[in-house]
């Protein structure tokens, strides 16, 4: 208990002032060193990337989001061996780092981050070329892993086969959270590192559209494996993607709804803050009308805080909807699932490519049974390709189109770097009309717009698979 003392024994005020001054001086001199020592011994802290011999350090605002092997970004795959590998990487002991990363993979074989770090460590003592991959680890770790697996597989295959003209490929991983503000800083940082020759990414179209002007201005190749927004088509000479134009994706779905399923009156729920799904909605409506269908006018926007699935569905049904097309942002798929849950299979469901996720199957279950959507790739439609089998063996399960398209994006960059290992030379190689790279099924070829030449596959949710439901190609 606090007790007051006799005032005559209290030291004069000047004593307190002197004492406080001494304490403050001691803290100024001593604490920074103490804090530095503590953080430097923590593998998952944010050491400077100066430990890596391959480029400039990022700004402090995003240093904790960028790693060549010096910190763990996918924390769900943390093991003691992986932590030891990161610490060894920070200390530039790349042999020990590689040994520890290899040991971690014995426990978690499907961790793409560790495979990338393993390859980076092995490449650190010799000739190497460096690219970056930017994914939404913080906001959507499942999608981030899907993309990273494609990049990791391509990196591992090229490095184990001798590299790119003898140079091993290093991949810097970036967590951008699909956040446009973060993406802007990421793009500025990556363009300032002269050793980074290309960027695989970004995921969501709003992220890619934020980064594209910066990459274009600074002349750094961006190849997005997953962004469909129309605004990216023909954006600039340094901007590419390994998915087809959104009009190519939406048209077969609208034609299927009208001509195969016989549903002419379709209502739409979309996300007004997701540029790719705005594009998908617009292209779907155009194709629906051309096929003889009709849009049922409703107000159903997944991005609105006031979104109410019961009201949205009731409105669509009351206006005569015979089917429902849903196009959510990748980070708001839960709202589309809530709408499907209220629907209970009453209206046939059609969806944008975004809905091809494990989350859709796991959380949607019987309520998404019968959902039809277009994808740029499916393992069962390419019997002559070795990629699905190689991917399944490596990752311990079937991969989806995001993994395939990020593999293709990395393959395209690798093929371009074989022709030139400069930023400008790579861009010229990819822009060449005769350019071609071996992809996950078909060769990767780019149109003058930067879009990939290709066509989609319609898939439908049916019973089966690890969740009880699976995406199956429509024959």
Image (cartoon, rainbow, N blue to C red):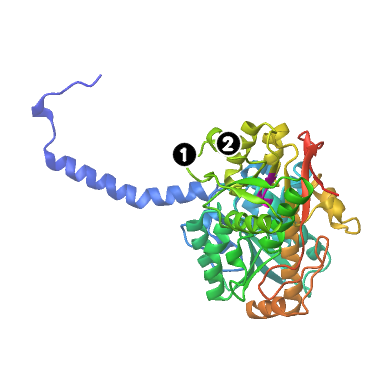
| Residue where numbered disc 2 is placed | 318
**Camera sees residue 57:** no
Q: Which residues are magenta?
A: 350-354
Specify the farthest residue to the top. Answer: 1
Q: Nearer the viewer, mark 1 or mark 2?
A: 2
> Which quadrant of the figure has residue 171?
bottom right
The location of residue 249, given as percent across then percent down, is 71, 58
Frontmost residue, 469 versus 114: 469
> Which quadrant of the figure has residue 212?
bottom right
Q: Tag 2, which secondary structure?
A: helix
| Residue where numbered disc 1 is placed | 306
The residue positioned 90% from the left and 55% from the top of the image is 383
Q: Which quadrant holds the N terminus?
A: top left
**Camera sees residue 264:** yes
Q: Tag 1, which secondary structure?
A: loop
The residue positioned 54% from the left and 44% from the top of the image is 300
The location of residue 295, given as percent across then percent down, is 61, 50
Q: CA distance from mark 1 to mark 2?
A: 20 Å
The location of residue 445, given as percent across then percent down, is 76, 71
Q: Is residue 29 above or below residue 231?
A: above
Frontmost residue, 219 versus 462: 462
Number of disc labels: 2
Frontmost residue, 240 versus 407: 240
The residue positioned 63% from the left and 61% from the top of the image is 201
Q: Is residue 251 above or below residue 364?
A: below
Specify the farthest residue to the right. Answer: 384
Judged left or right of residue 39, residue 25 is: left
Judged left or right of residue 448, residue 270 is: left
The location of residue 84, given as percent across then percent down, is 66, 47
Mark closer to the chain start, 1 or 2: 1
Q: Is residue 337 magenta?
A: no
């Amino acid at each position: 208990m606090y007790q007051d003392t006799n005032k005559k024994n209290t030291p004069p005020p000047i004593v307190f002032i002197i004492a406080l001054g001494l304490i403050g001086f001691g803290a100024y001199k001593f604490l920074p060193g103490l804090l530095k020592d503590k953080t430097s011994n923590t593998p998952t802290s944010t050491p400077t990337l100066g430990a890596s011999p391959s480029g400039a350090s990022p700004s402090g605002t995003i240093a904790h989001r960028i790693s060549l092997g010096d910190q763990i970004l996918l924390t769900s795959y943390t093991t003691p061996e992986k932590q030891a590998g990161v610490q060894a990487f920070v200390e530039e002991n790349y042999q020990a780092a590689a040994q520890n990363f290899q040991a971690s993979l014995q426990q978690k074989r499907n961790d793409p981050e560790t495979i990338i770090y393993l390859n980076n460590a092995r490449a650190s003592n010799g000739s190497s070329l460096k690219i970056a991959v930017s994914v939404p680890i913080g906001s959507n770790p499942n999608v981030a892993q899907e993309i990273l697996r494609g990049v990791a597989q391509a990196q591992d295959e090229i490095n184990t086969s001798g590299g790119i003209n003898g140079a091993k490929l290093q991949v810097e991983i970036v967590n951008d959270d699909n956040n446009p503000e973060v993406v802007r800083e990421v793009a500025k940082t990556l363009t300032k590192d002269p050793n980074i020759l290309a960027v695989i990414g970004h995921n969501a179209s709003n992220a890619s559209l934020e980064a594209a002007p910066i990459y274009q201005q600074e002349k750094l190749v961006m190849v997005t494996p997953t962004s469909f927004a129309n605004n990216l088509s023909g954006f600039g000479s340094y901007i590419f993607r390994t998915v087809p134009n959104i009009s190519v994706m939406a048209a077969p779905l609208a034609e299927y709804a009208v001509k195969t399923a016989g549903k002419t009156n379709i209502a739409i729920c979309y996300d007004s803050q997701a540029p790719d799904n705005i594009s998908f909605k617009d292209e779907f409506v155009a194709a629906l009308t051309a096929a003889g269908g009709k849009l049922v006018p409703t107000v159903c926007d997944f991005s609105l805080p006031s979104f109410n699935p019961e009201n949205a569905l009731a409105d669509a049904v009351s206006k005569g909807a015979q089917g429902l097309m849903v196009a959510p942002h990748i980070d708001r798929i839960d709202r589309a699932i809530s709408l499907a849950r209220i629907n209970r299979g009453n209206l046939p469901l059609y969806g944008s490519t975004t809905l091809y996720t494990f989350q859709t199957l796991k959380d949607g279950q019987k309520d998404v049974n019968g959902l039809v959507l277009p994808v740029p790739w499916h393992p069962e439609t390419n019997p002559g390709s070795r990629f699905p089998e190689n991917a399944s063996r490596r990752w311990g399960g079937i991969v989806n189109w995001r993994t395939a398209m990020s593999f293709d994006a990395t393959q395209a960059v690798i093929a371009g770097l074989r022709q030139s290992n400069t930023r400008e030379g790579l861009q010229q190689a990819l822009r060449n009309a005769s350019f071609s790279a071996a992809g996950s099924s078909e060769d990767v070829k780019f149109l003058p717009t930067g879009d990939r030449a290709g066509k989609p596959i319609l898939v439908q949710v049916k019973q089966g698979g690890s969740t009880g439901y699976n995406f199956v190609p429509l024959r």
